[in-house]
Amino acid sequence: RDAQESRGLGDVYKRQVDSLKGKAFAVLFNGIDYEGSTPAAHKISNEYLSWVNKQNCIAWAAVYHHAIYAEMAKNEQPAMFESKNRREFYDIESAKSWLASL
C-alpha cells in the first residue's frame, strides 16, 4: 500500500467513526490480502490508528494471512500497541466470533 491509498482509507474510516457521534464501536480489519506498505503509508496508518485509539473503540480484530504480515505492521505502527482490546487472527470467522463474544 502507498501513502495515498493509506490516507484515502484513513479518511473513510474517520468519517465512519465520526458518524457514530461517540457511540462505542469495534473494528474488524481484514488484512488477508495485505502484502506490506511503504514507510510513508505506515506513518499515515499509524496516525489514523492513534486517532482511533482515542475514540470509543471497544475492540479491534485484525485478520492477516500470515503472522509475518502482522509483525511487519506492528513494527512500523506502534499505535497498534495502544489499542485497549486488540487481537490478531488468521481467519475471518474466528475474528467475528471473538467480536460477537464481547
Image: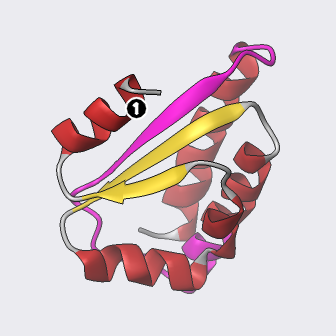
Residue sticking out furthest to the front:
101
Measured as percent of width and height from the top left, residue 18 is found at 75, 23
Specify the amino acid type for callout 1. Leu
Residue 4 vs 66, above or below: the answer is: above
Q: Is residue 12 left or right of residue 38?
A: right
How many labels sit on residues?
Answer: 1
Q: Nearer the viewer, residue 53 or 34?
A: 53
Measured as percent of width and height from the top left, residue 58 is found at 63, 34
Residue 56 vs 1, above or below: the answer is: above
- Magenta includes 37? yes
- Magenta includes 22? yes
Q: Nearer the viewer, residue 11 or 101?
A: 101
Measured as percent of width and height from the top left, residue 68 is found at 29, 83
Measured as percent of width and height from the top left, residue 70 is found at 37, 73
Q: Is residue 30 left or right of residue 9?
A: left
Which residue sits at x=27%, y=73%? 35
Which stretch is magenta? Answer: 20-43
Which residue sits at x=74%, y=61%? 47
Which residue sits at x=68%, y=21%? 24
Quadrant of res 83:
bottom right
Quadrant of res 12:
top right
Q: Is residue 63 left or right of residue 29?
A: left
Reading the image, the residue beneath label 1 is 99
Q: Nearer the viewer, residue 12 or 67?
A: 67
Residues packed near mark 1 inside 10 Å, few (<14), some (14 to 19) or many (20 plus): some
Which element is circle 1 on?
A: helix
Which residue sits at x=41%, y=68%? 1
Colour scheme in the image?
secondary structure
Quadrant of res 14:
top right
